[in-house]
C-alpha cells in the first residue's frame, strides 16, 4: 500500500472529527501522549473511546486477568484468565484503529519514575491507593513548563468517581458548537480577546484535605458517592486491600473519622440538616464492603464516557473543562460534577 493511500485513508477515518473539533484540534489529538495506568474500572471504556478518536496511548498494568474483570471489560474473554491483562486486551484494542500506536508497560505503578511519567501529556490512573495517586499527581501538577493533566478514577459496584487536575494555567478555547441556553442555535463566535480562557486547578492532595463543611453551600448536601469513596480510600490506605463484609466495623470507624475531621458529628445528624442526606447508613457501609472490587457495565460506560470527553478537552484545548470531581450514583442513575477549590 502506498504512502499516499495510507494518508488518504487516515484522513477519511477522522473526517467527521475534524468537522467537529477542527483540523488543529484533531492534530493535537493524534499527536498527544496519554498514559493509561491500570486497565480496570473506567479505563477500558476510556481506552476504547480514545483509540477510536485517534489518540496514541500507552497501557500500564502488571496484573493478570481474573474472573471479576469480565464484569465491565469487553476486551476480555474467559480464555484470558491468568494472562497479563495487557497481553489479553492488546489485540482487540489495536483492531479498533490500526492508525494509532499503542505502547505497553507491565511494571507496577509504584515503579513508574518521575522521568518516565514526564514523557506524557495526560495520565489517567485507575483505582489504587491515595498515596500513589497523590505522588503521581504532584509530579504532573508541578511539571514545567506545563502541567501534565491528571485524572484518577475508581468504581465500587454501581457507584463511581473521578478527580481531574488540569494543572496550573490551563488554557482552553471556547467550543463554538456549544449551544446557547435555548439549545437551538450555536453560541455566536466570541471576540478574539475573549476567545481563550485560563484556569488553575488545585492538586489532588488539596482536594482530599478539603473540609466537607468548608465546601460552597450550593454543593450541600454532601454527595454519598463522594463520601463512600473517601471512606473506601481511607481503608485501602491503611490495609492495602479492599474491605470484606467482616471489615464492616473498620469501615464504619474510618467513615466516622473522616466526618469528625470535618467537624461533623455522625451521632447527632438532626442538628446539621444541610448535610444529613450525605450521611452513610448501615446499608451504604455494607455496600462499600461488598462491592468495592466490582464494576458494573452501566456505571463504567456512563462515567467512562464523561471522563473520555474531559481527556479530549485536555488534549485538544477546546471546550471548558469540567470542575473537578465527578460522581455517578447507580441507585439514582445521576452523574454530577462537584467543584472543589476551583471555579470557571
Image (tube, rainbow, N blue to C red):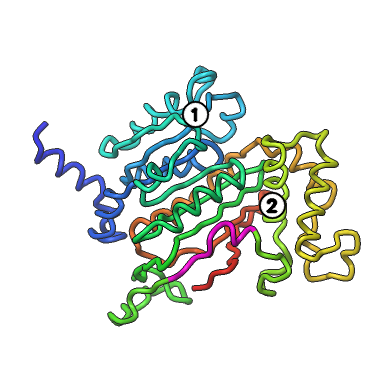
* Residue pictured at 53% horizontal, 24% vertical: 64
Q: Is residue 319 left or right of residue 77?
A: left
On the image, the x and y values in percent for residue 276 come to 81, 64
Q: Which residue is mark 1?
A: 62
* Residue pictured at 53% horizontal, 18% vertical: 82
What numbered label is drawn on residue 230? Answer: 2
On the image, the x and y values in percent for residue 50 come to 38, 45
Q: Which residues are magenta?
A: 199-208
Q: Is residue 231 above or below residue 71?
A: below
Image quarter of the N terminus: top left
Q: Which comes before the other along the chain, label 1 or label 2?
A: 1
Q: Is residue 312 above or below residue 297?
A: below
Element at badge 1? loop
Label 1 – label 2 distance at C-alpha: 25 Å
Between 161 and 204, the residue placed more toward the observer is 204
On the image, the x and y values in percent for residue 122 come to 40, 51
What numbered label is drawn on residue 42? Answer: none
Element at badge 2? helix
Q: Is residue 181 left or right of residue 254?
A: left
Residue 156: within the magenta? no
Residue 200: within the magenta? yes
On the image, the x and y values in percent for residue 92 come to 39, 29
- Is residue 129 something that shows in the picture? yes
Amino acid at each position: 500500500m502506498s504512502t499516499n493511500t495510507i494518508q488518504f485513508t487516515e484522513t477519511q477515518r477522522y473526517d467527521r472529527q475534524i468537522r467537529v473539533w477542527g483540523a488543529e484540534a484533531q492534530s493535537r489529538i493524534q499527536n498527544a501522549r496519554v498514559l493509561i495506568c491500570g486497565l480496570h474500572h473506567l479505563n477500558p471504556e476510556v481506552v476504547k473511546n480514545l483509540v477510536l478518536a485517534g489518540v496514541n496511548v500507552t497501557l500500564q498494568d502488571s496484573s493478570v486477568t481474573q474472573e471479576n474483570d469480565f464484569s465491565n471489560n469487553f476486551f476480555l474473554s474467559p480464555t484470558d484468565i491468568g494472562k497479563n491483562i495487557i497481553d489479553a486486551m492488546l489485540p482487540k484494542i489495536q483492531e479498533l484503529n490500526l492508525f494509532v500506536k499503542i505502547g505497553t508497560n507491565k511494571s507496577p505503578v509504584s515503579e513508574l519514575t518521575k522521568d518516565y511519567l514526564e514523557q506524557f501529556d495526560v495520565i489517567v490512573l485507575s483505582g489504587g491507593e491515595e498515596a500513589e495517586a497523590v505522588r503521581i499527581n504532584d509530579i504532573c501538577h508541578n511539571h514545567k513548563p506545563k502541567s501534565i493533566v491528571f485524572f484518577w478514577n475508581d468504581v465500587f459496584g454501581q457507584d463511581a468517581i473521578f478527580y481531574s487536575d488540569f494543572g496550573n494555567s490551563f488554557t482552553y478555547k471556547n467550543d463554538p458548537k456549544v449551544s446557547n441556553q435555548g439549545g437551538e442555535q450555536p453560541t455566536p463566535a466570541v471576540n478574539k480577546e475573549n476567545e481563550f480562557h485560563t484556569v488553575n486547578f488545585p492538586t489532588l492532595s488539596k482536594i482530599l484535605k478539603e473540609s466537607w463543611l468548608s465546601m460552597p453551600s450550593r454543593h450541600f448536601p454532601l454527595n454519598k458517592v463522594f463520601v463512600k469513596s473517601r471512606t473506601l480510600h481511607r481503608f485501602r490506605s491503611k490495609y492495602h486491600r479492599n474491605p470484606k463484609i467482616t471489615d464492616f466495623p473498620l469501615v464504619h470507624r474510618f467513615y466516622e473519622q473522616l466526618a469528625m475531621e470535618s467537624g461533623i458529628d455522625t451521632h447527632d445528624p438532626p442538628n446539621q440538616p444541610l448535610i444529613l442526606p450525605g450521611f452513610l447508613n448501615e446499608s451504604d457501609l455494607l455496600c462499600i464492603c461488598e462491592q468495592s472490587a466490582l464494576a458494573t457495565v452501566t456505571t463504567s460506560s456512563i462515567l467512562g464516557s464523561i471522563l473520555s470527553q474531559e481527556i479530549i478537552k485536555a488534549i485538544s484545548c477546546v471546550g471548558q473543562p469540567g470542575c473537578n470531581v465527578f460522581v455517578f450514583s447507580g441507585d439514582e442513575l445521576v452523574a454530577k460534577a462537584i467543584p472543589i477549590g476551583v471555579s470557571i
